[in-house]
Each structure stands twice: as structure tokens, then as C-alpha cells.
Image (cartoon, grey):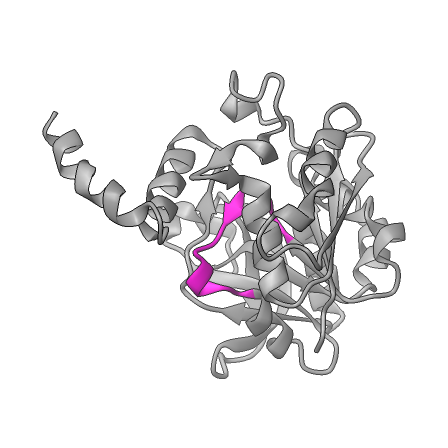
């Protein structure tokens, strides 16, 4: 399946990253040598995406769009159009995705969480497209230990794992170990058919009083319209200070320009 558009929810206020995000959108905080959202757009470009729809808040979203206006100077992004749509109110991740309905139209599309960065050698979007089969939506899942099942959406498998793909029959947002239907947790990469917008439009506020994307995944799965792609690829969470520091280290060490010099100074820093 060819997927040429991705949606990136980036309207969060970045409360966990304050004061760094008092005036700067969280998505523009630098990781190594570029804004975190640029890492996500570069990942989309590697999968053949030519248009990225960024969902922004009403106040500071234009700053994100402006960063990409000069994309011809950003390596690898000259063929990618980045456009912003506004989420007028913060009503949850599902509501943010629904805000992109008009821009996406009737196309299949990736959803990529701006807080979650991936190592460039472990891309997931192309495997998601291969797993879609006869035009089904696909979520990326990774097995988690019991103590982490209250932090993610968790899927209910309806078939045995075949290779790296399984059918799912439902999903629950942040269930905790007692309510979790499995230990397969959803992480921040999705491939949706446009029918997801109809499912989102029918979702009532759920966990935390918000419109949850996981509840739309549950609705799709119960209709037999969703699969899970299973892998053990870590996404680097830059939405909190410790995760942000770790992402800078992991991606900095892997950088062809900075990796070796950075590696050489770490032992001295640890001794200090």
C-alpha cells in the first residue's frame, strides 16, 4: 500500500517540559541538532510520504509551520509539503486526529506522535503499510511488562501472531494489569484508513474525560477493521525531561558527525 500523507498531533502545551516550553512549542525543542518534529517529518519522508499535516494549537502553531517553510534547505525534505491545521480546544488525542479530517480527506494516512522519536535504522512506517493487507488499519504494538500497562493503550488479540501481524478484536486505554486484555501495548505509530474519522466522530469522552484515539481503535477492531504490527522497536519519549535527555544521548551517539566525539567525552563526564 502506498501512503503519501501523515498526520502529526503537535498541539500539546508541553506542561511536563516547562519552563522550556513557556514560549516555544514542545515540538520545536532541539534534539541533537534539529527540532524534534523534524525528526518525525524526516521519518515520514523515508517512507515515501509527500505531505505532513501537523495539528497545532491556536496560539503557537504557526511557528511550527514557519520552520518548514524553508524546507528546501532541510536535507531530505525538499519533496515534502508540511501544512498546519488548528485544534481549537485540547480534547484528547482522538480529537486532535479528528481535527485533520478535512486535510486528509479519503486517503489512508499515518499518525505519528510528535513526542515519540525513532532511531533512523528502525523505521516502522513501511512495515505498517505492508501489514495493512486488504486496506485495514494497523497499530504498532510492543509487549510491555505488567507495571507499564497503565501507561498505554492495550490491544485484545483475536488471532495468533502470524509473522509480525495479528488481528485484534478490541483495545483499552491505560487499563492497568488487572484490566489489560494482553501485554501488547500501542505505541506512537499508526496507519489508518479514512473510515477511522467516522469511528472517531462516534466516540464519547473516555479515559481522563478526553476523546481517546484508542477508543476509535477499539471500534475499528470490533468491526474487524484493524490489525496490529508487532515488533520490539523502542520509541524515544521526548515529552518529559528524563526521556528528552535520553533521546539526545541515544540519537547523539548514533549521529555520524557527533557520535564518536560525543562517545569520547562520556567516560570523563561519568567520572566527574
Q: Residue at x 65, y 34 (%)?
A: 208
Q: Residue at x 35, y 54 (%)?
A: 256
Number of callouts: 0
Q: Is residue 224 left or right of residue 189?
A: right
Instruction: Choose top left, top right, bottom left or bottom right for residue 68.
Output: top right
Instruction: Choose top left, top right, bottom left or bottom right for residue 89.
Output: top right
Q: Is residue 45 magenta?
A: no
Residue 51: x %, y % from top left: 75, 57
Q: Is residue 90 visible?
A: no
Q: Is residue 217 visible?
A: yes
Q: Is residue 121 magenta?
A: yes
Q: Residue at x 37, y 51 (%)?
A: 255
State the residue in front, 30 or 112.
30
State the residue in front, 111 or 151.
111
Instruction: Using the image, determine if residue 177 lies above or below residue 24.
Output: below
Q: Quadrant of the N terminus?
A: bottom right
Q: Residue at x 67, y 37 (%)?
A: 67
Q: Quadrant of the C terminus?
A: top left
- In this view, the residue farthest toward the front is 73
Residue interval drawn in magenta: 112-124
Residue 197: x %, y % from top left: 83, 56
Q: Is residue 147 left or right of residue 217?
A: left
Instruction: Using the image, determine if residue 2 lies above or below residue 251.
Output: below
Q: Is residue 2 left or right of residue 37?
A: right
Residue 184: x %, y % from top left: 48, 62
Instruction: Choose top left, top right, bottom left or bottom right for residue 49.
Output: bottom right
Residue 209: x %, y % from top left: 71, 34
Amino acid at each position: 500500500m502506498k501512503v503519501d500523507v501523515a498526520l502529526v498531533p503537535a498541539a500539546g502545551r508541553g506542561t511536563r517540559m516547562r519552563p522550556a516550553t513557556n514560549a516555544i512549542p514542545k515540538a520545536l525543542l532541539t534534539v541533537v541538532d534539529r527540532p524534534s518534529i523534524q525528526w518525525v517529518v524526516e521519518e515520514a519522508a523515508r517512507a515515501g510520504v509527500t505531505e505532513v499535516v501537523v495539528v497545532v494549537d491556536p496560539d503557537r502553531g504557526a511557528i511550527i509551520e514557519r520552520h518548514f517553510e524553508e524546507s528546501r534547505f532541510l536535507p531530505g525534505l525538499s519533496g515534502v509539503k508540511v501544512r498546519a491545521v488548528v485544534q481549537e480546544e485540547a480534547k484528547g488525542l482522538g480529537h486532535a486526529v479528528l481535527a485533520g479530517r478535512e486535510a486528509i480527506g479519503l486517503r489512508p494516512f499515518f499518525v505519528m506522535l510528535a513526542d515519540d522519536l525513532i532511531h533512523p535504522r528502525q523505521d516502522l512506517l513501511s512495515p505498517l503499510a505492508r501489514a495493512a493487507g486488504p486496506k485495514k488499519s494497523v497499530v504498532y504494538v510492543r509487549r510491555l511488562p505488567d507495571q507499564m500497562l497503565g501507561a498505554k493503550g492495550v490491544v485484545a488479540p483475536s488471532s495468533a501472531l502470524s509473522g509480525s501481524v495479528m488481528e485484534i478484536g478490541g483495545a483499552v486505554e491505560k487499563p492497568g494489569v488487572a484490566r489489560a486484555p494482553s501485554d501488547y501495548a500501542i505505541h506512537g505509530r499508526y496507519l489508518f484508513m479514512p473510515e477511522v474519522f467516522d469511528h472517531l466522530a462516534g466516540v464519547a469522552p473516555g479515559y481522563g474525560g478526553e476523546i481517546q484515539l484508542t477508543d476509535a481503535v477499539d471500534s475499528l477492531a470490533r468491526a474487524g477493521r484493524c490489525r496490529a504490527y508487532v515488533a520490539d522497536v523502542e520509541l524515544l519519549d521526548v515529552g518529559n525531561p528524563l526521556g528528552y535527555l535520553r533521546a539526545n544521548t541515544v540519537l547523539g551517539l548514533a549521529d555520524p558527525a557527533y557520535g564518536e566525539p560525543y562517545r569520547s567525552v562520556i567516560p570523563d563526564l561519568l567520572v566527574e
